Image (spheres, rainbow, N blue to C red):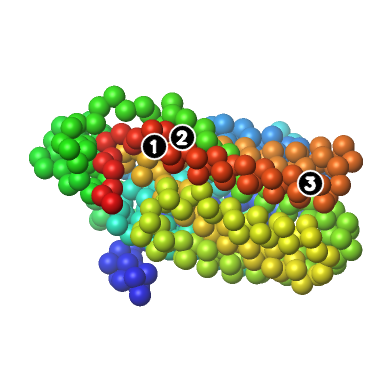
Amino acid sequence: MQFLILLREAPRQLAFGALHSFGSSFGQTFLVALFVPFISASLALNETEFANIYAGITIASALCLPVVGRWIDKVDILSYSLATMALLALGCVLIAASDNVWMLIAALFVLRLAGQGLMTHVSMTGIARYFSRNRGRALAIASFGFPLAEAILPATLLALIAAFGWRYTYAGSAAFILIILLPVAIWLIRSDAKFRKAPAKSNESANTAAAPDPNSAESTESPSGTPKTDHPRLFKSLYVWFCMPMLAAPPLIMTALFFHQGAISNHKGIDLGWFAAGFTVFAITSVLGAFGSGPLIDKHSARRLFPWHLIPMMAGIAILALTTVPWAILIYMGLVGVTTGFATTLRTAIIPELVPLDEIGAVRSTLTAVMVLASAMGPAIYGWMFAANISIAMMLLMTLIASLIVSVGSWFSERPGFYVPPNIAPKES
């Protein structure tokens, strides 16, 4: 019911978020992968060469994201959105026109930065800083664009590739972005100055606030009335270094396990079709996880929930390690999907609890870069373990132990004194 009330109160803002999470798919791996066989054949690349190029591009785009991502804190979000969509469309055009490896590298870089990086950044940052009381639910609704794209676009684009070829399909994707997504984004928030404007600087809000609410996310005083000054910034605190592995773990582990699912399938003697069917379960449970996490975040806070969100994934990996029964793959994928859904909302909802509103974009882009780097490193790390003849059973056990360690570290970071958010008063008990 609360979701429906929220949709009635802010339909355009939530649609703006979902539109960008949907549009990010044109630069996401699951969609780019559909074109890999056709691009490789056209440019005479083998699978390993393309994989190496793609990994390098992913890392390069991740390194650029903190620089470009922080601009969202300083400019009108609609202007930032339109520039991002134009860049994404350019990436689609460039990849459609690629006739050599260097042009392909440039195209993939633009596509990954604008799609996976900035489109998602616009969606999550805009929603996170606009909503306060129902931030968890709002982020869950905005993130619905991700599974919606995963359900609709692969089959649609494969049909278009079969009918018109991969180059015309990617060119058509650019047209879709410019003719459909971009005008809709303008229509949704053109007249909403509150949503569009960049947040005021935290020191400005502190100086101009006449009577701060101690429960407000922008309060600058503690309950005792003492002004909060000289707070350590997030990246200078122990807190973030204990939590960073927790942020990196899901993309690293899930990308690696999905990438090497063929080897896991062969090792366990399970038909790969069970893994393919598992992705349907994964998509369903990731939606359920995202929507289930929203009310919990709003009730308990993202910081309180954050140390526990790897538990479903750990249970799924334990099932994968201990069984060779084919249907257990569906349970494994379902549990991993729950963690994915929780992580989608938690990793954005936690940021406004740690920093002032005018720093959300800068902090989120940096943390996203860490997660993108982790996703690029995951398949390589597990590949090195394969090369070292480490058994899959041992790999999965090591994965469980590592997940437990980072979860304990994240829990430990919540002990008193690790980090006091600047300009954000502690919540009343």
Q: Residue at coordinates 81% horizontally, 37% vertically from top-left?
A: 384
Q: How far apart are marks 1 and 2 (CA)?
A: 10 Å
Look at the picture and state if 369 lies above or below 305.
Answer: above
Look at the picture and state if 69 lies above or below 165.
Answer: above
Q: Nearer the viewer, residue 277 or 294?
A: 294
Marks 1, 2: nearer the viewer: 1
Q: In which quarter of the image is residue 317?
A: bottom right
**Residue farthest bottom in this picture:** 1
Q: Position of residue 66 (x, y in %)?
A: 48, 33
Labels 3 and 2: the sequence-earlier one: 2
Q: In which quarter of the image is residue 326?
A: bottom right
Q: How crowded is mark 1: few (under 14 residues within 10 Å), some or many (20 or more)?
A: few
Q: Look at mark 3 in the image and give the residue it sits on.
A: 395
Q: Distance between the residues labelled 3 and 1?
A: 35 Å
Q: How far apart are marks 3 and 2 (CA)?
A: 28 Å
Q: Position of residue 349 (x, y in %)?
A: 41, 50
Q: Residue at coordinates 54% horizontally, 59% vertically from top-left?
A: 341
**Label 3 sits on what residue type?**
Met
Q: Look at mark 1 in the image and give the residue it sits on.
A: 416
**Label 2 sits on what residue type?**
Tyr
Q: Look at mark 2 in the image and give the residue it sits on.
A: 239
Apparent side of residue 25 relative to residue 19 in the rendered image (left or right): right
Q: Nearer the viewer, residue 349 or 127?
A: 349
**Label 1 sits on what residue type?**
Pro
